[in-house]
Image (cartoon, rainbow, N blue to C red):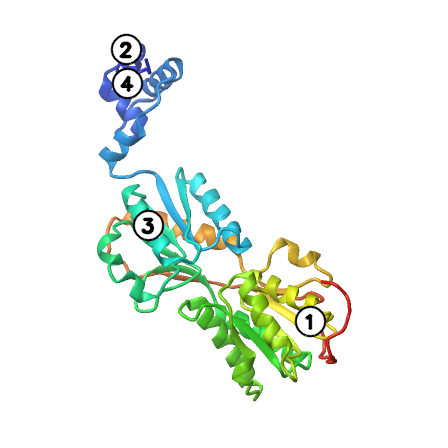
């Protein structure tokens, strides 16, 4: 039989109420009694009943985390940061992966409600129309991660996508590029719209009016960018530089360049949003916008714990806008041109 709280009380020579107060921290107990109770807990092997305690306190000591693609190094790193910060605060994390699928995401949102997570950290896959009933059904404090939902002001931790993309495009312009292409993401996502805006702002600031054909849509996955890149690279004239709106699409872009026998950066310069460990290992190394993944995850947990402690909905939404860093590597150089030919593998 598993030891009970009564067994601990008997071993410590105290009341059940005293054991409960020590285990749950609900009221003051003198230090000598605390030591006796803890010694009895260790001696008996008693484990406090987490479910019963959560029902009494109205908390579960868990945070929910929903990301859209756990294979994306950005979300992998942020998830690790969330788990680390939650663990330090005494919380466990329930992790779900939506695969950019709103229907699958809806199932996980329901799961988070059933699990009664104390707060939810969430990278949404849909637009505002997908969440018309969200406010009424989701009772836990919710912090948006990486993306915001237009028309739904909520706590969020994001980066300044417009500024970061503009900086990368201006770097390419400074190298002499004028025909700069963009592989963007799904148009309903805030990250896609903001990165597109940063591209347009940079081009406009230098009196450049790119053809609409130079902006092609992907879905933040490698295969979509590969297909988009093939269309761009078969243009006549083709772009001299391409910016991919995330790391996975950069990989698809690089694969298309390799298949056509083009050289990077001699024939085509490449830059991308989101740094990842392997980016510096490519030949040449990939120029990227590095997001502060550790700080993003930690900030999301910080806001979540603050909202749990407030226990009300009267606060104004907090939007923490983190700053990224442009990491210059060898994948960008002055425009060269020339037809596809066998060349250096990437």
N-terminal-most mark, 1 or 2: 2
Residue topped by disc 3: 107
Residue topped by disc 1: 332
Using the image, tell me which numbered label, if any, was put on residue 5. 4
In the rendered view, does 17 fall on the left or right side of 271? Answer: left
Q: Residue at x 24, y 39 (%)?
A: 58
Q: Quadrant of the C terminus?
A: bottom right
Q: Are marks 1 and 3 in contact (CB under 8 Å)?
A: no
Q: Nearer the viewer, mark 4 or mark 3?
A: 3
Q: Quadrant of the N terminus?
A: top left
**Which type of secondary structure does the marked residue at label 3 adopt?**
helix
Estimate how packed mark 1 is, as few (under 14), some (14 to 19) or many (20 or more) residues with alpha carbons within 10 Å: many
**Which type of secondary structure does the marked residue at label 4 adopt?**
helix
Q: Whole-Å distance between the Cαs marked 4 and 3? A: 37 Å
Q: Whole-Å distance between the Cαs marked 1 and 2? A: 73 Å
Residue topped by disc 2: 10
In the rendered view, does 266 fall on the left or right side of 13? Answer: right
Of 315 and 62, the residue lying toward us? 62
Estimate how packed mark 2 is, as few (under 14), some (14 to 19) or many (20 or more) residues with alpha carbons within 10 Å: some
N-terminal-most mark, 2 or 4: 4
């Amino acid at each position: 039989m598993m030891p009970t709280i009564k067994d601990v009380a008997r071993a410590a020579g105290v009341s059940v109420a005293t054991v409960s107060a020590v285990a749950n921290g609900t009221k003051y107990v003198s230090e000598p009694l605390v030591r006796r109770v803890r010694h009895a807990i260790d001696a008996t092997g008693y484990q406090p009943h987490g479910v019963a305690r959560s029902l009494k306190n109205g908390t579960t000591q868990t945070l929910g985390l929903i990301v859209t693609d756990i294979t994306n190094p950005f979300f992998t790193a942020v998830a690790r940061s969330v788990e680390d910060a939650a663990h330090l605060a005494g919380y466990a994390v329930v992790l779900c992966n939506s695969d950019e699928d709103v229907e699958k995401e809806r199932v996980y949102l329901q799961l988070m409600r059933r699990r009664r997570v104390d707060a939810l950290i969430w990278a949404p896959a849909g637009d505002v129309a997908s969440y018309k009933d969200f406010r009424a059904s989701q009772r836990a404090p919710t912090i948006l991660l990486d993306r915001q939902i237009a028309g739904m002001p909520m706590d969020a931790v994001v980066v300044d996508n417009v500024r970061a993309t503009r900086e990368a495009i201006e770097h390419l312009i400074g190298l002499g590029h004028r025909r700069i292409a963009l592989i963007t993401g799904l148009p309903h996502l805030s990250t896609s719209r903001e990165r597109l805006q940063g591209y347009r702002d940079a081009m406009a600031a230098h009196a450049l009016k790119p053809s609409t054909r130079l902006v092609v849509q992907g879905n933040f996955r490698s295969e979509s960018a590969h297909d988009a890149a093939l269309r761009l690279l078969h243009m006549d004239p083709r772009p001299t530089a391409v910016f991919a709106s995330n790391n996975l699409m950069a990989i698809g872009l690089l694969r298309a360049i390799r298949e056509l026998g083009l050289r990077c950066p001699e024939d085509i310069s490449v830059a991308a949003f989101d740094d990842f460990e392997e980016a510096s290992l490519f030949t040449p190394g990939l120029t990227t916008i590095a997001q502060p993944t550790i700080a993003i995850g930690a900030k999301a947990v910080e806001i979540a714990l603050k909202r749990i402690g407030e226990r009300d909905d009267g606060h104004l939404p907090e939007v923490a806008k983190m700053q990224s860093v442009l990491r210059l590597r060898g994948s960008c150089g002055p425009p060269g041109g020339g037809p596809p030919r066998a060349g250096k593998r990437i």
